Image (cartoon, coloured by chain):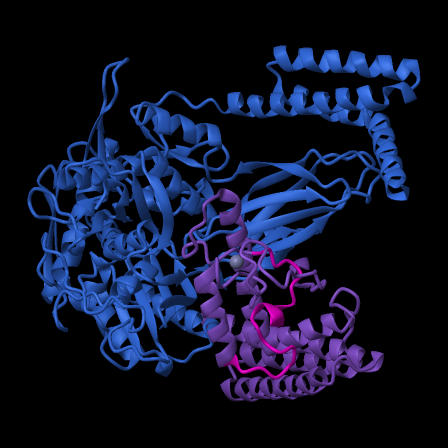
Chain colours: A blue, B purple
Amino acid sequence: MADDDIVLGIDLGTTFSLVALVDESGPRVLTDENGEARMPSVIAVAPGGPDEQPRVTLGWEARNHAVENPHATVYSIKRLIGKGPADVEKELPFLAYAVRPGPRQTLVVDIDGRAYTPEEISSVILQALRERAERALGYAVRKAVITVPAYFDDAQRQATRTAGEAAGLEVLRIINEPTAAALAYGIGLRQDTGKAATPPRGHSPLPMMRCSDQEVGDGGDATGETVAVYDLGGGTFDVSIMRLEGGVFQVLSTAGDTHLGGDDFDREIIKLVAREVHEQFGVSIEAPATKQALRGFAEAVKVRLSQTESAELELDLGNDRKYRRTVTRDEFERLIDPFVTRTLELMDRALRDAHLTRDELSRLVLVGGSTRMPIVRRRVEEFFGRPPYTGLDPDQVVALGAAIQGAMLGNRRWDMLLLDVTPLSLGLETMGGAMGKLIMRNTTIPCRATEMFTTFIDGQTAIKLNVLQGERELARDCRSLGEFELRGIPPMPSGMPKVEVEFMIDANGILNVSAKEQRSGKRASIQIVPNHGLTRGEIDRITRDSISFAQQDIDAHRRIDLVNQVEFDINKTEQMLGKVGTLLEADERRRIETDIAALRQLAQESGDLDALHQALDRFGRSTLHLAEIGIREALISEQKKAME
Amino acid sequence: MSTSDNAVKPSLPAKCVKCRHDLKNPAICGHCQTVYPVDGVNYFDLLGLETTYDIDPRIVRERYVSLARAVHPDRLRADTPEVEQLSLRTTAQINRARDVLLDPVMRAEYLLGMAGGPSAADEKSVSQDVLMDSLALREEIEEARAANDAGTLASCLETVRGRHADVLARVAELARQLPGDEDLRHELRVRINVISYYRKMLEQDAEHEES
Ligand SMILES: [Zn+2]
């Protein structure tokens, strides 16, 4: 197999990340030197000197030393990626590291005065997994499929892809975690014959039952089978309903919550302890080191309570103050029951969207480390009326599925097709602040919608759109993907331009927008100022600099865009002057020439970007008459041609 | 709704421009896998179905799957970014065709559009008595919910489901008679408008249950 054919499957998880690949012997998860497949999604940054690069440790090492270095140890970054300050208000008090708002409603992690974007931190994890694969293979690997929660929105998907690029990977596909899991099960991958929840881990490739496209799925028949994947990880919950039929994996619906997972269970224990410590000793747990220690405790208690009926907790508060407590499984389950109930409600919603009842499911598959908890198994079994299916290690199945998708895309080893859906409705803010839906949630991707726009002011050359994702009626309750500005519309009287805007959601679930003015046939340029995401310039920078960070210079990027637009508009106007300038009064012609020179100079010198923006708009208005003459002349010459 | 649902009868080549074999499907040549743009191709033609209201959902799914397997960018070996892009757009169109044709209301609406009937934008009205009836029902549902009166709530929802089924039956009846005359097309439009009222009521109930 050529190096080029290897595509990594990466499960970039909230608490753990894994990497898998498919080679001649089949799909396998890659392990570290201790035989451990999971790598903690934790990085720690040790400050370097003023001109040095920060020193980064990650994985088990970073995790094991978290308490010593709490403010510089970053965990659960997946909960922040593609998110804005308003999204994470509730989380911030629980984080031991500092998070502050970045530009355009993004977040940055602040370590010793340096800002790290979630993309950068994720890219360090991805890079480590890539290196693990390269060590195992003995050659460089460039391509990967990376998984995301099915319920991730556009900004979160884009950000994950950016992290992959920054890690030097060509991201062939962003695939949904439950879909990846279903794929691993669907090709008949098995680690054992049935019940055991934790099959042996290790390097050995997995046997495959069947690989032909005719008989996909264990026990599948010609009419196919319908599978629900219940995926409860460290930070996110997803449920996907899919049909496996004739070599096609079709997701029918998906639902989820990107802020619901094992972390929340830990947090319930943390809240309990913090409250009692405050009651008993009158102290609040504020110090990062104590927070970090408490986090470790809480997680250990949670894991313990999956095996035993009770767990001991002991916290040394200094000055001979010791907090001691026994937590029983019953008590813990009462605390987290509302979260489990919420997952089952989401399961019902997914079934409803798929037009199915619980009885019509042929199988329910459990994925994600948090499904090891007895309460989750019990409640899911009650819901489903049958025991759930757990043939594969719930920690590994997602990475394996991603590797299989990688092999499908890379060398088309399996004659199968995966059809996923978009998890959230897509729309535009309409007049009056409502959400006008263009693409409904759970529509099969790729999908597209088109919408016509026109201008309200004579000579208007740009239209602004607020693109939204979400299910709520009001725009302000939905998530704004950012401001999309259509530019380069030929100046015409108001209402005349017919700009067709196409919204295409590709197979990654990522939105692409294009626009065309139909009278002139001109492609309008689209400038996107993303919310919760990085601009192209920022992506290029982190790709280039890897993990050396200067203070971001957003203005520089905006300046480049504006200057480009100035050049574009000036060129267009000069062309127009060349063609029809003789039809203008000498005065007007001279004025336009002066305006061009002034605008050009401003673009070269001005540090005031808002002033430049305004000057550009003024220029558009002052050349309107020329543009109108241009259009008129063009139409006349068209008509002449048509007559001949 | 999106403009991409409008069929505009484009002139389709009968033979593949590349290999000259007969084109059995407007989206792709079965012989040399050349993909064609299908903007404006009628959804029934696209999936190789007769243009009629009564369809067999199983056949729609079958046709869809075999076409998606051929055209989808993951399956097609596109040599150029242009072909890749075309395969993406054509797949999106096939996905849309399947969704429209499998939904009894969207299918009726689509046929109505083909017959030159009024669009949702042209004719927004619903008949007065239906409007009053559905407002009354909604009020009753809200009251029952506020009072935690499960019995009344269930019977109200049953009524909504019944109304929904009745209108849907009438929509089907009218859609089968298309193109029909102007009155028929108008009635069909108005009935379709009504259905979305009931659908919304049922959806809202489901969402309410959830929260
Ligand atoms: Zn051909």
The image position of residue B17, as x and y in percent, is 59, 55
In the image shown, does B100 or A485 lie closer to the viewer? Answer: B100
Is B205 left or right of A382, judged from the image as shown?
A: right
Magenta part, dominant SS: loop
The image position of residue B47, as x and y in percent, is 56, 70
Q: Residue at x 80, y 13 (%)?
A: A593
- Residue B71 in view: yes
Is B8 left or right of A261, judged from the image as shown?
A: right
Outermost residue toward the front in this view: B20
In the image shown, does A48 or B2 lie closer to the viewer? Answer: B2
Classify A30 as above or below A385: above
- Residue A74 in view: no
Outermost residue toward the left in this view: A34
Classify A80 as above or below A256: above
Is B115 left or right of A419, judged from the image as shown?
A: right
* Residue A210 location, quadrant: bottom left
Q: Residue at x 43, y 43 (%)?
A: A158
The stretch drawn in magenta includes residue B55: yes
Q: Residue at x 25, y 45 (%)?
A: A6
The image position of residue A285, as x and y in percent, is 24, 41
Q: Residue at x 74, y 45 (%)?
A: A518
The stretch drawn in magenta includes residue A577: no
Q: Which residues are magenta?
A: B36-57
Classify A141 as above or below B198: above
* Residue A608 location, quadrant: top right
**Dividing the image into 4 quarters, which one contains the N terminus of chain B?**
bottom right
The image position of residue A523, as x and y in percent, is 66, 39
